[in-house]
Image (spheres, rainbow, N blue to C red):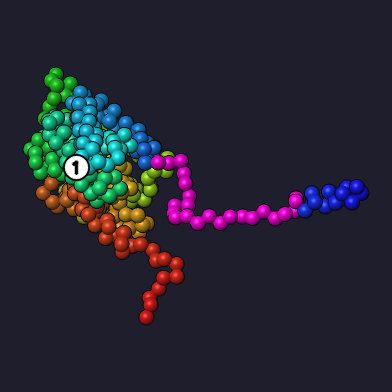
Amino acid sequence: MDEKIQNKPQEKSKETTQPTIDRLVVSSSPHFSTGDSVPKIMHAVILALLPASAASIYFFGLNALLLGLTCVIACMLTEYAIQKIRRKPITVWDGSAIITGILLALTLPPAFPLYAAALGSIVAIGLGKQIFGGLGYNIFNPALLGRAFLQATYPVMITTWSEPLTKAAKHGIDAVSAATPLALMKFVEPKVMTPHLDLFFGNVAGSIGETSAFAIILGGLYLRYKGYINWKMPLGYLGSIAFFGWLFYLANPQKYPDPLFHILAGGAMLGAWFMVTDMVTSPTTSVGQWIFVVVAGFLVVIIRLLGGLPEGVMYSILLMNAITPLINRHTKPKVFGEGNQS
């Protein structure tokens, strides 16, 4: 009896001092997880595009709203149909097709026909995205590819601009044909330089979602606050445009516009905050990202000032999209321990 009583504490002590065994779990990357997902990021981008969309409706009225709805619906239906035909999972509600539709609409003139906008949306999703395998596999920005198709298919309609409603109302009519600030700078003699304040707030002729730099910056800063875009991409792109524009301005201030005009006019702001920052079609390495934005900014200025077109944002981004795989290949960091083997 006494022995049993004496042994009980010893048994309890033995149980409590028994060491625990840690398990080593081996799994594939990624090893860090966050609460972010593709739909969550895409919906944040949609939210960030709302200020530019609202500004487009304010300046260009019902036409802007109808263009946006047409492009979004056409993009979603195209994605659904292709995935259904290919018997792939339906991802139409992840938000990526909606973003493509909004961005494409924002790059179109106010009076652009709805049937042509729908056609461009079909091309953007079909040829710009799904033909490569869907989201994550596309080489080019789908919205810009759709816009490039429309540029080639309807060159007159896509370069027919209207004054904002705020200016047209002064003439007592619904719409007034007008030239964009870039066209006024490039093709009119003597050159007409649009005031910076008009460019900043958007009271100028142009694509419905590219005129208001203020609205675009609001959305871009929201994405930066959420951590969904890398600061190097928009600032590097705009900085590159400003730098090369300044070199021309320095050489001949009477002939070429100042750097601020370059970054406020045309599609520079929309391209910088919402297209250059595309996670799929931009480089993944830090060095590669700098190469991308510097060369793209240089191309914008060259096309604007020396080319036959007044705007070069679309072509600069698409050209750099094409060589992004090459940039990634030649700028990837070496693996630790990797070296030349003889």
Instruction: Judge whether residue 182 can be spotted in this image.
Output: no
Kind of element beneath mark 1: helix
Judged left or right of residue 23, residue 194 is left
Relative image position of residue 111 (x, y in whole percent) = 14, 29
Instruction: Judge whether residue 163 can be spotted in this image.
Output: yes
> What amino acid type should be assigned to the residue bearing mark 1?
Gly
Relative image position of residue 236 (x, y in whole percent) = 33, 51
Provide the residue span drawn in magenta.
Answer: 15-37
Measured along the vertical axis of the image, is residue 131 above or below residue 63?
below
The quadrant in which residue 196 appears is top left
Q: Of residues 105 and 336, which is closer to you in this image?
A: 336
Residue furthest right as drawn? 2
Q: Of residues 163 and 13, which is closer to you in this image?
A: 13
Q: Which residue is mark 1?
A: 126
Judged left or right of residue 29, residue 188 is left
Q: Quadrant of the C terminus?
A: bottom left
Task: Say which residue appears at 77% left-offset and 53% top-offset.
Answer: 14
Residue 254 in magenta stretch: no
Task: Say which residue appears at 32% left-offset and 54% top-offset.
Answer: 283
Task: Say which residue appears at 13% left-offset and 43% top-offset.
Answer: 149
Q: Of residues 301 and 110, which is closer to you in this image?
A: 110
Relative image position of residue 173 (x, y in whole percent) = 13, 20
Task: Say which residue appears at 13% left-offset and 40% top-offset.
Answer: 150
Measured along the vertical axis of the image, is residue 173 above or below residue 103?
above
